[in-house]
Amino acid sequence: NAGVTQTPKFQVLKTGQSMTLQCAQDMNHEYMSWYRQDPGMGLRLIHYSVGAGITDQGEVPNGYNVSRSTTEDFPLRLLSAAPSQTSVYFCASSYSQGKETQYFGPGTRLLVL
Amino acid sequence: EDQVTQSPEALRLQEGESSSLNCSYTVSGLRGLFWYRQDPGKGPEFLFTLYSAGEEKEKERLKATLTKKESFLHITAPKPEDSATYLCAVRSYNTDKLIFGTGTRLQVFP
């Protein structure tokens, strides 16, 4: 199993540009989530999904969109990038939302100029 | 409001010098406490899950313990390869979402 994969590894955007961060998992996990990690702050939840067709907002959802059309994929879309969205983004998955351990991808480093 | 506080922020140890990392938490009903290891430029790697006070888990030189207010990650005779940032997270019955601490950056020198 490849586990949780993310693309791209690194991206530079200009303010106002849009882009999609890709996340895929091959473990048949129902629960998937997106976090951002900033210096001096813990990982913060952006959006999550408990299964295909179901998504919900996390702690910091503004400026981001998600969709979940398949169990395997959970892309994160930045509609109009802002410098405040410069961060490292991690995708995670688990069998369910409950007690299950979440497994993280390698991350996407995003720089918005 | 659910909160997680980790201390110290950074810890420098000599190889073989045992120590402990602390994770204090406030949650409305603990559903689970998680420890992760994160190497620079990589995603968090799962270490342990603890569910109830008194529970302990071990893996190589690491041992995690849990009380009703805090968790400790004990590192016995650390080696330079144990150098990493260690993250603590909790999930409560109230929000059912993972709340992360800011981590402890551990450096072990030979």
Image (cartoon, coloured by chain):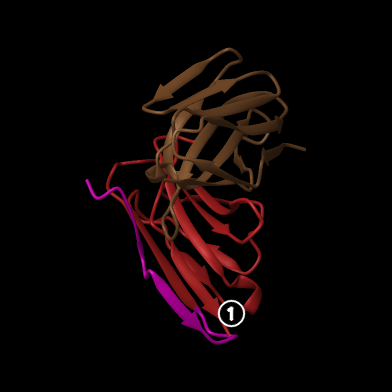
Report the magenta residues as a range. Answer: A1-18
Compared to residue B36, the image places residue A59 above or below, namely below
- Which residue does the image show at 68% across and 38% down from the upper left? B4
Labels in figure, total: 1
Residue B2 percent across, percent down from the top left:
72, 36
Residue B40 percent across, percent down from the top left:
45, 57
Q: Quadrant of the image for the N terminus of chain A?
A: top left
Q: Is residue A64 left or right of residue A21?
A: right
A86 and B5: which one is in front?
B5
A30 and B20: which one is in front?
B20
Compared to residue B21, the image places residue B101 above or below, namely below
Which quarter of the figure has residue B65? top right
Display colour for chain B: brown
Camera sees residue A51: no
Residue B89 percent across, percent down from the top left:
58, 38
The stretch drawn in magenta includes residue B1: no
Q: Is residue B33 left or right of residue A21?
A: right
Identity of the amino acid at label 1? Ser
Which quarter of the figure has residue A23? bottom left
Camera sees residue A34: yes
Q: Farthest residue to the right: give it.
A: B1
B65 and A65: which one is in front?
B65
Q: Is residue B69 left or right of residue A13?
A: right
- Which residue does the image show at 36% across and 27% down from the upper left? B60
Give the red chain's letter. A
Q: Residues within 10 Å of mark 1 (few under 14, many from 20)?
A: some
Task: Say which residue label 1 marks.
Answer: A80
